[in-house]
Image: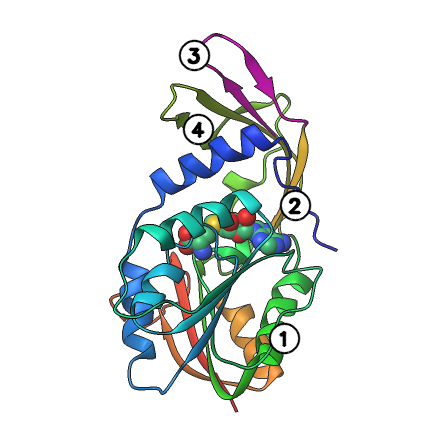
């Protein structure tokens, strides 16, 4: 079962989605994915953790049929709006499905699966990372492609991560001012960690202060992160029957090196 709870309150989630879109508008990964897919004969793409369609929408513009999965209806609403705003040479073929990608099964019959934008860091265990690889395998047709991109942490959790917080402290995300003037802040308290297994467990709270002074606090919820390592994912891919076509440390296509800060794995289902 997936253990990282969404923020819960609808207004807070809406504000958090707005701030997410404002902060995460980079496109270098999208360009890299488009390059990798070029000339491979792919038609239907699945993007679990599609969020507000930052990657999915440009893939539609490239003429692919794209299906996005995400458990946040708020993110999917923003994806729908992004698609409405975009222009296409021909009517885009897409589906946006609200589901938990850890707990529920994925649709099948795809020529590519995209697991981008650090999505493994949303997951709390090695088993959940492995589940993403094996669900990708099931969703892909034979010969289909898998793209995985995450911040990379080879080895153990660094010491800076291994500190229990005696008190909650301000956190970086979500944080900021929304268009209507509402200010969002987050607090975090690290309560546990496993250095060797690279698991980090914190309690988190998100709060909003509206322009009229009204405040809204989420419940404290658990965040478990199993940080992602290219070495582990490489093994999972091999065990699941994928052939690894490329390992990169950046979207410039530079090769992966042990301990680098980002890792992209590009594989094919044999
Ligand atoms: C970091 S965002 C990435 C969004 C998008 N791929 C992008 O590049 O902008 C991660 C997304 O994963 C979704 N998510 C996290 N855990 C999930 C789960 N277990 N099931 C479905 N969606 C999940 C969140 O709602 C969020 O929209």
Q: Position of residue 185 (x, y in %)?
A: 49, 24
Task: Specify the segment rendered in magenta.
Answer: 205-219
The residue labelled by disc 1 is 134
Q: Nearer the viewer, residue 21 or 81?
A: 81
Which label belongs to residue 175? 4
Residue 212 lies within the magenta run: yes
Mark 3 vs mark 1, foreground winner is: 3
Q: Residues within 10 Å of mark 1 (few under 14, many from 20)?
A: some
Above or below, 249 relative to 181: below
First in residue order: circle 2 vs circle 1: 2
- Mark 2 and mark 3 in contact? Answer it, CB < 8 Å: no
Look at the numbered disc 2 and say if its residue's Cβ is closer than 8 Å to ligand 1. Answer: yes
- Mark 1 and mark 4 in contact? Answer it, CB < 8 Å: no
Q: Position of residue 159 (x, y in %)?
A: 53, 42
Q: Residues within 10 Å of mark 4 (few under 14, many from 20)?
A: many
The residue labelled by disc 3 is 211
Relative to residue 28, is residue 76 drawn left or right?
A: right
The residues bearing labels 2 and 1 have C-alpha atoms spaced at a distance of: 20 Å
- Mark 3 and mark 1 in contact? Answer it, CB < 8 Å: no
């Amino acid at each position: 079962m997936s253990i990282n709870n969404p923020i819960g309150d609808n207004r807070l989630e809406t504000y958090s989605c707005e701030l997410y879109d404002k902060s995460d508008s980079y496109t270098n990964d999208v360009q890299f994915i488009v390059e990798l897919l070029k000339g491979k004969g792919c038609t239907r793409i699945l993007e679990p953790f599609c969020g507000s369609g930052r990657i999915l929408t440009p893939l539609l513009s490239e003429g692919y049929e794209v299906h996005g999965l995400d458990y946040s209806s708020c993110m999917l609403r923003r994806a729908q709006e992004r698609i409405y705003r975009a222009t296409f040479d021909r009517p885009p073929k897409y589906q946006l499905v609200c589901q938990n990608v850890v707990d529920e099964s994925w649709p099948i019959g795809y020529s590519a699966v995209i697991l981008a934008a650090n999505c493994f860091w949303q997951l709390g265990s090695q088993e959940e990372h492995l589940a993403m690889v094996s669900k990708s395998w099931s969703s892909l047709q034979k010969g289909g492609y898998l793209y995985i991109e995450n911040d990379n942490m080879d080895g153990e959790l660094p010491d800076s991560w291994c500190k229990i917080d005696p008190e909650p402290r301000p956190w970086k995300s979500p944080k900021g001012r929304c268009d209507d003037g509402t200010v969002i802040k987050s607090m975090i308290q690290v309560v546990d960690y496993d250095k060797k297994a690279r698991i980090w467990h914190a309690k988190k709270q998100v709060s909003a202060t509206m322009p009229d002074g009204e405040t809204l606090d989420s419940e404290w919820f658990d965040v478990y992160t199993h940080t992602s390592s290219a070495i582990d994912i490489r093994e999972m891919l091999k065990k699941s029957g994928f052939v690894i076509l490329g390992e990169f440390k950046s979207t410039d296509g530079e090769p992966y090196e042990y301990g680098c800060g980002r890792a992209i794995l590009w594989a094919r289902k044999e």
